[in-house]
Image (spheres, rainbow, N blue to C red):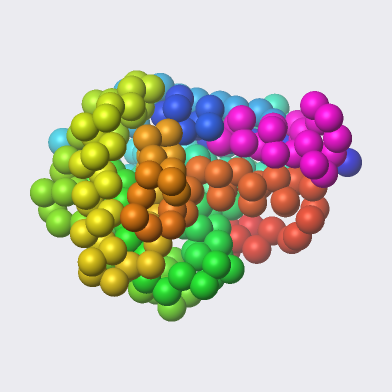
Amino acid sequence: MSRHIGIVGCSSEGAALCYRTVCLEAEPWMGKHAHPEVSLHTIPLAEYMTHLSPDENWNQVAELMLRSAETLKRAGADFLICPDNTIHQAMPSVVPRSPLPWLHIAEEVGREAQRQGFRKLGLTGTRFLVSGPVYSEKLEQMQIGYMRPTADQQERVNEIIFDELVRGQQKLDSLFYFQQVIEKLKSLGCDAVVLGCTELPLLVGNTETPLPTLDSTRILARAALRYALQVNPLRSSYS
């Protein structure tokens, strides 16, 4: 028996990539066409954005996440993941009231960075994510260094994410710009880059960047798959 995975979605593109990864990468362990039971609940992104712009209200973001968590518990989920880096900033308000345990995306990315021996990571994602505490706190706990893009770069990448990637659009000029951002992080001593927006892997992969990438979407999905199949224990601080 495998554990039932509950996915708390935020944007459709990130949630879909996470879901596909769980389903497709289960086959080597479970057999052809097999995967753990998965339930996905997604409140419209517009409701989340209401609490992010112009001012950030993480308590209200937490309320939306808890609505999904309760729905997924009723659907039979045993634990939860959220393939959206940005709204992990609401986790301190979510965890004490959550009906189920969670895997934390930044913790899983940090563990993968340790496994591969990376020592200094470039952080990319929405401006909320890059300027916020989600990765800085976890990476500092793991003694992994990190660098942020410039404020102007953060703003442009944020536009690419919300104006293009969440709509399923991948533009060549946006790819070129993102490659320049990563090149700058490399020049500052980073040995890998965190794709800290769950839509960024749809734009860029290892073959298109000057640094190895840590694909947060697929890393989280694989961690959930391992836990669902009881390959290793739930190590999240939110269990």
Instruction: State the image quarter where residue 81 is shown.
Output: top right
* Picture coordinates of residue 193, whole percent (x, y): 37, 57
The correct choice, above or below, for 173 with respect to 101 in the image is: above
Quadrant that contains the N terminus: top right
Q: Note whether residue 28 is visible.
A: yes
* In the foreground, 188 or 90: 188
Does residue 172 appear to the left or right of 110 in the view shown? left
**Count of marks, rendered view:** 0
* In the foreground, 13 or 51: 13
Q: Which residue is drawn at 28% across and 54% down?
A: 182
* Picture coordinates of residue 187, whole percent (x, y): 23, 66
- As drawn, the residue found furthest toward the bottom would be 143
Tell me where the magenta segment starts and ends, as one range: 18-37
Q: Which residue is drawn at 37% across and 71% down?
A: 120
Q: Main secondary structure of the magenta part?
A: helix
Quadrant that contains the C terminus: bottom right
Q: Residue at x 53, y 32 (%)?
A: 17
Taking the magenta stretch, the answer to whether it contains residue 147 is no
* In the foreground, 153 or 236: 153
The correct choice, above or below, for 116 with respect to 60 in the image is: below
Instruction: State the image quarter where residue 122 is shown.
Output: bottom left
Taking the magenta stretch, the answer to whether it contains residue 22 is yes
* Picture coordinates of residue 125, whole percent (x, y): 31, 46
* Picture coordinates of residue 179, whole percent (x, y): 27, 47
